[in-house]
């Protein structure tokens, strides 16, 4: 298999703090990869290393089989890597028209440059604003022009840094479709940084989730949904819960006890006496009358986009669960069914049941040192675009992990 991107053991330290460590990542030609994770997880730092806007302190990075960074003597600057880039803040040249923005990015010697640029604007459905300047466009139109310009240089790999974050919902949905279609038509690969699970479901062939500077899980969107390997990934993929429950022995297996029923979720059991329990919304549902189940009271029922969200309190316990139903239920006593295949359990400390090292205080590994940021003066258009990474907004949008206390803690997100 041919990889357009191959990273082995990459690491990066800044100010004595280890931002990335042990990054192994491959992307086959023609595939779309979404880099997901909370703010501060290292997503943009990794994208900068791939772009050549920063340099690795360890490991190797190869593009299309060619070594571009070995954390030593080899370092190919950004403008020589043949990449296309799209930024969160658009980064269009404000004094040029949209057509001129795209035309300037075409490779030297391209025949009929204006026609070629117009074809790209047409592909992104902004040919009607070709002669306008960026300030005269909406955010969605500016980002379409930015994507057209990135494709104009005919890259084999397209890098996108949260390109939809400043757009409204409708623009986001339309632009996702247009981006995916354009990348496929161009026959290139793409790496997109995002906080939004919708980007994973609607764009990605592969998803890599970063936590505390390491890739916690990489796979298809379906594999992450079926078997999330950490509480963050469970929540990111839409799981409910996050409650603390005791781990008990039931026969030869570890289990959790819910309403007198012993349930063993798939995967290795947590190592301690308590676990954090998550579940899919359809794993907890009302039991049809006369078919038994777990006694519970429906304490809150609300309509959510075509289905009903129900908050349950187990009879005689403080434990609260929640789930979805296609039909409304009346508040009051009912029986519920819990499907153990839709449950996920993790160590209470915040990691998963495997032996993950989630300690983010690892500056000692850097020896208190880290290379400064690398900017290159000879990069032409690519160099001027590069400041989009350095100047991006930070903080304030990451989602924290829910925490509970006591023997049971209520689902904080029900």
Image: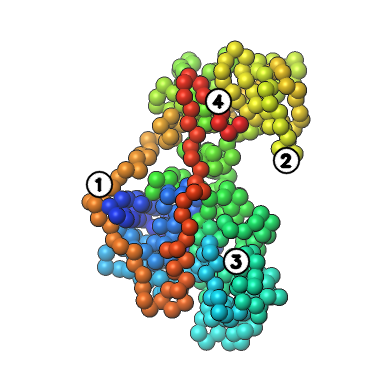
Q: In the figure, 238 relative to 27: above or below?
A: above
Ranked by sequence position, the earlier of labels 2 and 3 is: 3
Q: Are marks 2 and 1 in contact (CB under 8 Å)?
A: no
Disc 2 marks which residue? Answer: 305
Q: CA distance from mark 1 to mark 3?
A: 41 Å
Q: Estimate how packed mark 1 is, as few (under 14), some (14 to 19) or many (20 or more) residues with alpha carbons within 10 Å.
A: few
Which image quarter: residue 353? top left
Where residue 186 appears, x then y in whole percent? 59, 69
Can the viewer see residue 274? yes
Where residue 395 appears, x then y in whole percent? 46, 51
Disc 3 marks which residue? Answer: 143
Q: CA distance from mark 2 to mark 1?
A: 49 Å
Disc 4 marks which residue? Answer: 410
Disc 1 marks which residue? Answer: 364
Can the viewer see residue 5? no
Q: CA distance from mark 4 to mark 1?
A: 38 Å
Q: Estimate how packed mark 4 is, as few (under 14), some (14 to 19) or many (20 or more) residues with alpha carbons within 10 Å.
A: many
**Disc number lying in front (4 or 1):** 4
């Amino acid at each position: 298999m041919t990889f357009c991107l191959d990273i082995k053991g990459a690491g990066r330290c800044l100010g004595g703090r280890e931002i990335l460590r042990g990054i192994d990542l491959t992307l086959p030609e023609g595939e779309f990869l979404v880099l997901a994770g909370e703010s501060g997880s290292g997503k943009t730092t990794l994208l900068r290393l791939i772009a050549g806007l920063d340099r690795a302190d360890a490991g190797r990075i190869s593009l299309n089989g060619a070594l571009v960074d070995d954390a030593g003597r080899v370092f190919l600057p950004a403008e020589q890597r043949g990449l296309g880039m799209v930024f969160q803040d658009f980064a269009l040249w404000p004094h040029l028209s949209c057509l001129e923005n795209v035309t300037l990015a075409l490779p030297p010697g391209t025949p009929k440059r204006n026609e070629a640029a117009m074809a790209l604007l047409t592909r992104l459905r902004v040919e009607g604003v070709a002669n306008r300047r960026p300030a005269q466009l909406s955010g969605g139109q500016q980002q379409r022009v930015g994507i057209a310009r990135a494709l104009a240089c005919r890259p084999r790999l397209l890098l996108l840094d949260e390109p939809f974050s400043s757009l409204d919902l409708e623009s986001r949905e339309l632009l996702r479709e247009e981006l995916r279609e354009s990348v496929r038509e161009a026959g290139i690969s793409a790496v997109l940084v995002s906080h939004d699970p919708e980007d994973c479901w609607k764009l990605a062939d592969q998803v890599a989730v970063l936590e505390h500077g390491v890739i916690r899980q990489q796979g298809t969107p379906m594999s992450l949904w079926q078997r999330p390997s950490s509480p963050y990934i469970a929540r990111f993929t839409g799981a409910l819960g996050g409650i603390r429950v005791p781990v008990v022995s039931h026969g030869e297996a570890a289990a959790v006890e819910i309403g007198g029923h012993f349930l063993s979720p798939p995967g290795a059991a947590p190592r301690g006496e308590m676990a954090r329990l998550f579940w899919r919304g359809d794993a907890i549902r009302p039991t049809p009358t006369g078919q038994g189940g777990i006694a519970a009271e429906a304490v809150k029922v609300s309509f959510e986009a075509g289905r009903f969200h129900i908050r349950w309190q187990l009879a005689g316990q403080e434990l609260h669960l929640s789930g979805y139903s296609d039909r409304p239920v009346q508040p009051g006593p009912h029986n519920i069914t819990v499907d153990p295949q839709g449950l996920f359990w993790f160590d209470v400390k915040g990691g998963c049941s495997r032996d993950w090292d989630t300690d983010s205080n690892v500056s000692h590994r850097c020896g208190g040192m880290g290379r400064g940021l690398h900017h290159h003066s000879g990069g032409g258009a690519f160099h001027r675009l590069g400041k989009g990474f350095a100047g991006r907004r930070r903080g304030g949008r990451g989602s924290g992990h829910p925490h509970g206390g006591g023997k049971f803690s209520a689902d904080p997100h029900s």
